[in-house]
């Protein structure tokens, strides 16, 4: 039996990827509100997902404020599908 992806097995990272699955993209404030995470923890987890290629991160300045926007990549979508498939296998044992 295949192991669950440890990167997605984290509650906050799984929440981020799950949210991004249902929207085209989401900004940092939206993700923070939906996950109820602290800014620091959310930043760290977004960085880990981006380093793995699971999400794309765009940083820009809007007016005078920085804005971080995230979107799920094809690799992230495939990883989430594989995670769910493996989880189902565990549940059917």
Image (cartoon, rainbow, N blue to C red):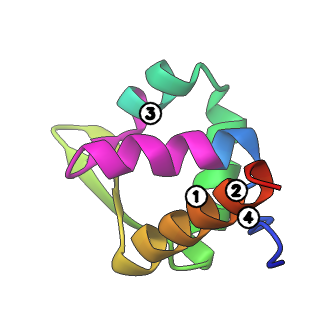
Q: Which mark is residue 7?
A: 4
Q: Secondary structure at mark 2?
A: helix
Give residue 32's position: percent from left, percent from top.
Answer: 50, 27
Q: Tell me the SS state at disc 3.
A: helix
Q: Nearer the viewer, residue 22 or 52?
A: 22
Crowd around label 2: few <14 · some 14–19 · many ≥20 (10 Å): some
In the rendered image, which residue does mark 3 sit on?
31
Instruction: Report how far apart the C-alphas of labels 4 and 2 lie in the structure.
Output: 14 Å
Q: Is residue 17 above or below residue 58?
A: above
Q: Are marks 3 and 4 in contact (CB under 8 Å)?
A: no
Sequence-wise, the earlier of marks 2 and 3 is 3
As measured in the structure, the alpha-carbon distance from the residue carrying label 2 to the one carrying label 1 is 5 Å
Q: Is residue 88 magenta?
A: no
| Residue designated by label 1 | 84
Q: Main secondary structure of the magenta part?
A: helix
Q: Which mark is residue 87?
A: 2
Magenta stretch bounds: 14-29
Closer to viewer: mark 4 or mark 2: 2
**Does residue 72 sit above or below 34 in this rendering?**
below
């Amino acid at each position: 039996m295949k192991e669950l992806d440890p990167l997605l097995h984290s509650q906050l990272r799984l929440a981020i990827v799950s949210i991004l699955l249902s929207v085209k993209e989401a900004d940092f404030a939206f993700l923070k509100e939906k996950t109820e995470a602290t800014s620091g923890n959310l930043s760290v987890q977004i960085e880990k997902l981006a380093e793995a290629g699971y999400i794309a991160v765009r940083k820009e300045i809007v007016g005078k404020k920085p804005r971080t926007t995230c979107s799920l990549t094809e690799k992230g979508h495939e990883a989430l599908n594989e995670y769910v498939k493996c989880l189902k296998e565990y549940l059917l044992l």
